[in-house]
Image (tube, grey):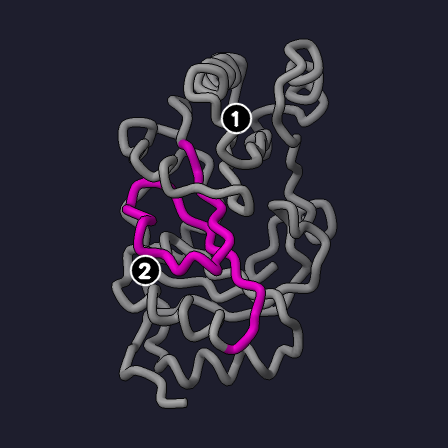
Amino acid sequence: MAVPAVRLQITEIFLSIQGESTRAGLPTVFVRLTGCPLRCSYCDTAYAFSGGATWTLDAILAEVARRGTRYVTVTGGEPLAQRGTHALLVALCDRGYAVSLETGGAIDVSGVDPRVMKVLDLKTPASGEAGRNRYENLDHLGGDDQLKIVVCDRADYEWARQRIEALDLAARCEVLLSPATGRLEPRQLAEWILADALPVRLQLQLHKVLWGDVAGR
């Protein structure tokens, strides 16, 4: 099958254990694209803001195949900031991979291949980027997609709870609440969720439990 002449700026491609989403725990190839228009206060991948190397689509697909697992996550940075990302997602799906996309929620997701599981962020006030949330993206989330909210403090939690209820987010897709590393204790977030019987999944970053803040994991 002919592959389009697409080139993408890639920070890294690596095999690890999926640490987030409903696929947590599964061996997964991560394709981390370079560049992001957001500057979240808790960002743990600032090294992907710039640099990287230019890869052809053929080379990316060959590297993914070499890793030998069917699960692939396209992440960043912000992967949708590069126009060629849509072609990459289509090519991965066409080859039978179970593909997920991690996106910050500020860029239109309507054109993402429907076979891709979208993990879409909703940015809280403490992230510093709540004004960049593209709420129209919520209309493009289906039952297999997930909405991720990283919570930094009680005010963030209340903001998230109000939007989950007002927008009936749990009826659209699974909602994941994560404590910001070093800013909110997971146990505290768990207690708030239980007190409100909030219809969400508490999510911890499994890769950080296993390896700490190690780049490429």
Residue at point 39%, 53% (across, down): 77
Q: Secondary structure at mark 1?
A: strand
Residue at point 35%, 85% (across, down): 3
Q: Nearer the viewer, mark 2 or mark 1?
A: 1
Image: 51 above or below 169: below
Residue 82 image position (x, y, % from top left): 28, 62
Tag of residue 103: none
Residue 181 image position (x, y, % from top left): 58, 34
Count up the numbered dots.
2
Side (left or right) of 173 relative to 166? right
User: From the image, which quarter does the N terminus lie in?
Assistant: bottom left
Residue 95 image position (x, y, % from top left): 52, 78
Mark 1 is on which residue type?
Val
Residue at point 56%, 65% (across, down): 72
Image: 216 above or below 105: below
Mark 2 is on which residue type?
Ser
User: From the image, which quarter does the C terminus lie in?
Assistant: bottom right
Judging by the rendered image, the residue that carries numbered circle 2 is: 50
The reply to whether discs 2 and 1 touch (Cβ–Cβ < 8 Å) is no
Magenta extent: 95-122
How would you classify the magenta stretch by its main secondary structure? loop
Side (left or right) of 115 relative to 51? right
Side (left or right) of 152 relative to 27? left
Q: Which is nearer the N-term, disc 2 or disc 1?
A: 2
Judging by the rendered image, the residue that carries numbered circle 1 is: 151
Pick the residue in front: 73 or 45: 73
Asked whether 155 falls inside the magenta stretch, the response is no
Residue 197's image quarter? top right
Separation of marks 2 and 1 at Cα, in angstroms: 26 Å
Residue at point 46%, 36% (across, down): 42
Q: Residues within 10 Å of mark 2 (few under 14, many from 20)?
A: some
